[in-house]
Image (cartoon, grey):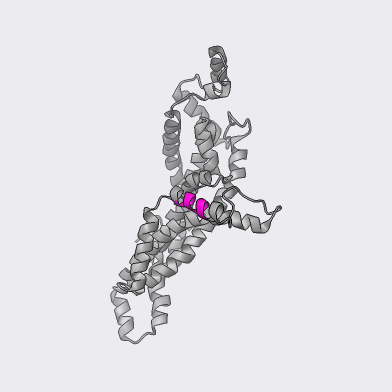
């Protein structure tokens, strides 16, 4: 196990290197010059050139990339052009809010998606299966930002049950804090529930078609025992895989949802930084997301071994 973990972490090095090149190239390909934004509309060309030299933006792109890479290697994310604070300080102060909304959304997706997907798979072709398929098709096809705007219009503006956006501090009101979580969580969670529902249904149907399930039925095994000890357990691998993918998607999807609900996470910070051409901040957030996805994949691989002992974590699955 230790050798497997070391091997996987060493594999992160080339992935991070390639990701850093892509992130740097994409950020530098954005139109606009951060020096113009920092200098302001009344600045002279001399002021703009002075700012470019101050932040090293007048150097060639390879020189800028190597300088950024050296700083990143030391854990130095640089200083924000706009906020004049350490990028790492800002990113890690916002990250818990994004993880909170991603975690509550994933929990919602698991609570709704897995039981209904199991019921749809066990009742293939019946009303529960048709209803689950209709819900998952509608939820997957509906854009998250549109669903979020609809939720704000209905539950915040028209009914006044929930706040339209922002985050209420627990010091101010615990009930208000929970209420402010509802709309962004449901917006992200319903899409995840639909994906998990479909994945669980397909996995259950595939497992029910296995020969050992037919043998267990022929031997008179109780239906509940068959479902919980054989069907659900052997359907867990694709569900775990999809859960890991969904958590990554939810953190990525928070970029849009946080902007819709004025949520103080790294998604909203990323959008603001892109608008302001805050190169260091954008690059830092994207690298943190890459690291998060890599760690998530590692956790999913470890769960494989825990769920199915036939899978040995020796660097390859069999």
Q: Main secondary structure of the magenta part?
A: helix
Instruction: Tell me where the magenta segment starts and ends, as one range.
Output: 147-154
Q: Quadrant of the C terminus?
A: bottom left
Residue 48 position, x and y percent, is 54, 17
Q: In this orientation, which residue lies closer to the viewer: 147 or 308?
A: 147
Q: In this orientation, which residue lies closer to the viewer: 278 or 194?
A: 194
Residue 82 is left or right of residue 172, and the answer is: left
Displayed quadrant of residue 208: bottom left
Residue at position x 53%, y 32% in the image: 280
Residue at position x 56%, y 53% in the image: 156
Question: Which residue in the rendered view is the most extreme toward the front?
Answer: 158
Q: Is residue 28 above or below residue 293?
A: above
Displayed quadrant of residue 134: bottom left
| Residue 199 seen anywhere in this rendered image of the structure | no
Residue 37 position, x and y percent, is 54, 24
Residue at position x 48%, y 57% in the image: 189
Q: In this orientation, which residue lies closer to the viewer: 189 or 158?
A: 158
Assess whether residue 149 is covered by the magenta stretch.
yes
Q: In this orientation, which residue lies closer to the viewer: 240 or 254?
A: 254
Tally of marks: 0
Residue 194 position, x and y percent, is 40, 60
Q: Is residue 58 above or below residue 272?
A: above
Residue 23 is left or right of residue 157, and the answer is: left
Assess whether residue 175 is covered by the magenta stretch.
no
Residue 12 position, x and y percent, is 45, 45
| Residue 67 seen anywhere in this rendered image of the structure | yes
Displayed quadrant of residue 62: top left
Question: Which residue in the rendered view is the most extreme toward the bottom?
Answer: 220
């Amino acid at each position: 196990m230790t050798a497997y973990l070391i091997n996987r972490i060493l594999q992160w090095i080339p992935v991070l290197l390639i990701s850093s090149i892509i992130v740097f190239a994409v950020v530098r390909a954005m139109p606009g010059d951060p020096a113009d934004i920092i200098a302001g509309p009344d600045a002279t060309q001399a002021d703009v050139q002075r700012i470019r030299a101050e932040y090293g933006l007048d150097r060639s792109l390879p020189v800028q990339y190597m300088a950024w890479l050296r700083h990143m290697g030391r854990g130095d994310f640089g200083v924000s052009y706009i906020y004049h604070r350490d990028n790492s300080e800002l990113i890690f102060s916002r990250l818990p809010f994004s993880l909170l909304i991603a975690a509550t959304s994933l929990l919602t997706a698991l609570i709704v998606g897995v039981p209904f997907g199991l019921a749809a798979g066990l009742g293939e072709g019946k009303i529960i299966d048709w209803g689950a398929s209709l819900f998952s098709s509608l939820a997957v096809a509906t854009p998250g930002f549109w669903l979020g705007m609809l939720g704000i219009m209905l539950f915040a503006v028209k009914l006044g049950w929930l706040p339209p956006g922002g985050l209420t501090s627990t010091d101010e009101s615990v009930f208000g804090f929970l209420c402010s979580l509802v709309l962004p969580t449901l917006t992200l969670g319903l899409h995840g529930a639909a994906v998990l529902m479909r994945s669980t249904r397909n996995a259950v149907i595939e497992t029910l078609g296995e020969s050992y399930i037919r043998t267990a039925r022929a031997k008179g095994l109780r239906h509940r025992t068959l479902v919980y000890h054989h069907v659900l357990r052997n359907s867990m691998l694709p569900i775990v895989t999809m859960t890991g993918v969904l958590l990554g998607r939810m953190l990525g999807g928070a970029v849009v949802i946080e902007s819709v609900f004025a949520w103080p996470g790294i998604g909203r910070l990323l959008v603001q930084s892109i608008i302001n051409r805050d190169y260091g901040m954008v690059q830092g957030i994207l690298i943190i997301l890459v690291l998060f996805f890599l760690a998530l994949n590692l956790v999913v691989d470890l769960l494989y071994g825990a769920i199915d002992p036939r899978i040995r974590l020796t660097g390859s699955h069999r």
